[in-house]
Image: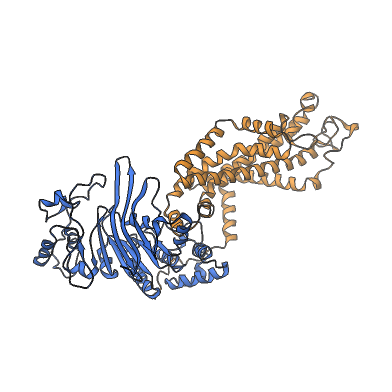
Chain colours: A orange, B blue
Amino acid sequence: MATVETFADVPEASAAARWRTFVVDFCRQRPLGAIGAAVVLLNLVVAALANVISPYDPLATDYGAMLAAPSRAHWLGTDAFGRDVLTRILYGSRTAMLVGFSCAFIGATLGAVIGVTSAYFGGKVDLLIQRVMDIFLSFPLIILALAVVAMLGTGLENVIAAITVPMIPRAALVARSSALAIREMPYVDAARAAGFRHGRIILRHMSPNVMAPYLIMLTAFLGQAILLEASLSFLGLGVSEPTPAWGLMLRGAAVQFAESAPWMAIFPGLAISLAVFAFNLFGDSLRDALDPRLRTQ
Amino acid sequence: MADALLDVRHLSTRFTTREGVVRAVDDVSWDVKEGETVALVGESGCGKSVSALSIMRLVAQPAGQIVGGQAVFKGRDLLTLDEEAMRRVRGREIAMIFQEPMTSLNPVLSIGRQLTEGLEIHLGKTPQQARGRAAELLGMVGIPDPERRLPQYPHQFSGGMRQRMMIAMALSCEPSLILADEPTTALDVTIQAQILELMKDLSRRLGVAMLMITHNLGVVARYADRVNVMYAGRIIEQGTARELYGNPRHPYTLGLLRSVPRLDEPRRSRLAPIDGQPPDLTRLPAGCAFLPRCAFRVDRCSVERPPLVPVAHTGPEPHVSACWEAERVIARQETR
């Protein structure tokens, strides 16, 4: 048999090299995104090493140094129980990252699977799933999260569930619209003709093709989840004392002593803003980098 | 017909659209014998592809419905199998090759993965075994250096190589029948010939029967044993390739043959196109569907639809045509 077509023999870059060029290009073309990514990374490192880098125990009270102003001993001051604010912010990033990543990951993944399934089957299945998603979408994020907490009660797992639930329909919507185009591709029919099960076609053949919107949703959800967790905690519906959490640090005594000890509210607030801002910057840049329609600039 | 591998009888598939019911495939019967290549010829929209999809039970529902007939494959009627049993037939016993090699391969899965998946699922091979077999298959369809090609992705393959890859995928589970839906239409003419030669060679060597769906009569002449000509959802002429070329008995077949350039014609001679358009499948006339475009029409054609009846033939194989004036068609062919 004759062998043919010998072009396409261009030497290929290894996976590691391709990653490196992607990262270098990303940093050069989107410096803001790179800064966001750096802050996100910093957050993760802090969360992982909170017990190593923190100057104090986050739960240790020091009644000799209550409401102390920022100083050498307490860089960001202390709260009404004499607990070090810096330490609690560092530990608080653990809660924020845990909630942020688990909610964004679970929410975006479940949503994507539902969206792709909906697009794959089409017809009545699609109609039914989409109407259920519409019902969820008609509530603002925070209201739905509040409703879930009201049903399940407070606590870390319940907060994660409460934040995940409203994210699912949003992810499903985006994944479905991308998957509708994928559904029409001949390779989906080819997979059917090859005798594969529906589940395999959805998960192995279609889902990888909606990876770009999935990653974009994931990063967008991260910031939202952190903000939502802070909001819920601030409302007293999130994690409860004495767990260090940014939203929690803004409530109670922080409000009471807002004028005499503003550092109690300012620094956790800054932490929330910085984290959410960084995630959003990173997410936006990642979207621009991954979305071929925006790549022409 | 007892030895037919796939015997399609009175197959009818309809699509319900806003404009009305489209009889895409209307009472169509044909068969494929073990190891043989059968062609299904006709212009776009005549029901060729829908016939193949109906047999695979992959017609888009709920718009498309198989409303009648049988497709007996190895003694079982595919149209009444349950979904799970049908799934085991697809890819394993009847494989399909699609028209567009560019879009029929999944861009995010590696060549190796796409080749091994069927082997693991249908034949229960381990990943290592499947990988070895995949490399073997790539080599078999003439892709050089298969081991190095396996981790690559479809975008690193040219059109011809992708179609070779599709053939390798179709052959992977050693099916007894391959439905090839316009396998070369999207390719360059030079690559077309290579792919067709490859398919013919492999089908012969492996004893795979093939249903070749095409609108290219050149393909039919060279590669098919028997030919079914379809027009407006029906078969209008059926016979061996040799018989149909030398002795066409339907004005449509004759028209098709005369619209193809031939090397043995004088250089100046003009091609004779078939005038007009194929009919609207939602509003088929009572008589012959080809009537408005036919040069042989008589009064009877508009009243009564001609049945598919045997005509005089030269070889041992039967030759049938659906034309009231079948005898005149042959006469015209000779005086040309």
Q: Nearer the viewer, residue A14 or A213?
A: A213
For residue B278, above or below residue A103: below
**B49 on left or right of B104:** left
Which sits in the foreground, A69 or B233? B233
Of residue B222 and residue A233, the one placed in the foreground of this image is B222
Can residue A297 be seen here? The reply is no
Residue furthest to the right: A64
Looking at the figure, which quarter contains the N terminus of chain B? Answer: bottom left
**Quarter-of-image position of residue B207:** bottom left
Left or right of residue A80: residue A193: left
- Quarter of the image with the C terminus of chain B is bottom left
Task: Say if residue B143 shows up in the picture.
Answer: yes
Relative to B224, residue A105 above or below: above
In depth, the one of A81 and A20 nearer the eye is A81
**Residue B37: x, y in percent?**
32, 68
Residue located 59% across and 56% down the image: A19
Locate residue B140, reporting x and y percent: 44, 73
- Total labels: the figure holds 0
Q: Position of residue B270 (x, y in %)?
A: 14, 61
Point out residue A234 in the picture as x, y percentages from the top left corner. 72, 30
- Image: A134 above or below A291: above
Residue at (51%, 51%) from the top-left corner?
Answer: A202
